[in-house]
Image (cartoon, grey):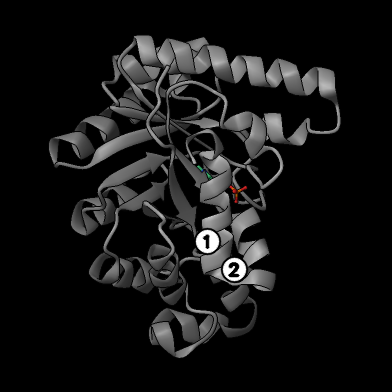
Amino acid sequence: MSKNPILLGLNIDHCATLRQARYREYARDCGQMVEPDPVALALSAEKAGVDGITVHLREDHRHIQDSDVWRLRDCIQTRLNFEMACTDAMLQIALELKPETACLVPEGRQEVTTEGGLDAAGQRQRVGKIVENLNANGIATSLFIDPEPEQIKAAAEMNSPLIELHTGTFANAYYDLEQRNIELEKLRQGIELAHELGITVNAGHGINYINISEIRQLPWLHELNIGHSILSRAMFNGIEEAVREMKLRMNLALA
Ligand code: PXP
């Protein structure tokens, strides 16, 4: 089993959600002139040791704006993970932006946040074409998928170097011990399969300061993408302390 520390990618979308709640019109053009600024948050989080910054530029631009991703590209010192829908328009933006990684996610207009994994197995042609294009242009792809063998095998067949396993179903089952253990076991088996197939495994969605004690025991995890819980804690303790505490809990056995 891997003994390397698990890395932390901070998803800063909800900082932009808060900004948009007040400054919907201004945020598009004024960037850092309105608060809270997700780019300033990213820089503080980097000081506290995050390993990467994740943003989802949704097609409806409900939180992160184009200007945010370009300012992040210019400012951050770690890695930019660009979450994107499988569309030609997003592909063009990614090719210009050149993030270190692009994570392909499903996108539904009605959902509050991403609610399930991408059906890579059911959309092999469309997803495979985007994976090929991004990888050929030096952008490592990740597929946000459920821990289902057919999805993991599809990712391997498309030569996606990374996957991000959807941990939301596990997180939602927190108060049902039996179901929670079932979901944790699915994640474990999914990670083992991906590892056998040579894929680097990230995970994310619904991870918090409590359930991290179970998530961190999964084998072979490379990076966790966490947003809501860290940003919530940051409101009380500040972003630097919130990041440091999560990093500590992610790697307790190594501390
Ligand atoms: N990974 C992906 C692909 C996501 O869509 C999200 C939610 O935006 C996250 C990770 C982070 O989830 P959470 O905000 O629940 O930590």
| Coordinates of residue 33 in the picture (x, y in percent) | 44, 90
Q: Is mark 1 within 8 Å of ligand 1?
A: yes
Tag of residue 17 = 2
Q: In the figure, is residue 253 to the left or right of 42?
A: right
* Rendering coords of residue 195 (x, y %): 38, 15
* Residue 19 visible in the displayed image: yes
- When asked about the image quadrant of residue 236, the answer is bottom right
Side of 72 relative to 191 (left or right):
left
Q: Nearer the viewer, residue 64 or 187?
A: 187
Q: Nearer the viewer, residue 211 or 58?
A: 211
Amino acid, disc 2:
Thr
**Which residue corresponds to the image point at 54% horizontal and 84% vertical from the top-left?**
35
Q: Which residue is mark 1?
A: 13
Question: Outermost residue, bottom direction?
Answer: 33
Q: What residue is at 75 percent from the left and 35 percent from the top?
A: 172
* Label pair 1/2, CB-CB below 8 angstroms: yes
Element at label 1: helix
- In percent of the image, x 65 and y 70: which residue is there? 237
151 in relation to 79, above or below = above
Residue 176: x %, y % from top left: 85, 26
- The residues tagged by marks 1 and 2 sit, at their Cα atoms, a distance apart of 6 Å
Relative vertical location of residue 255 with respect to residue 186 in this rendering, above or below: below
**From where the camera sits, is residue 117 visible?**
no
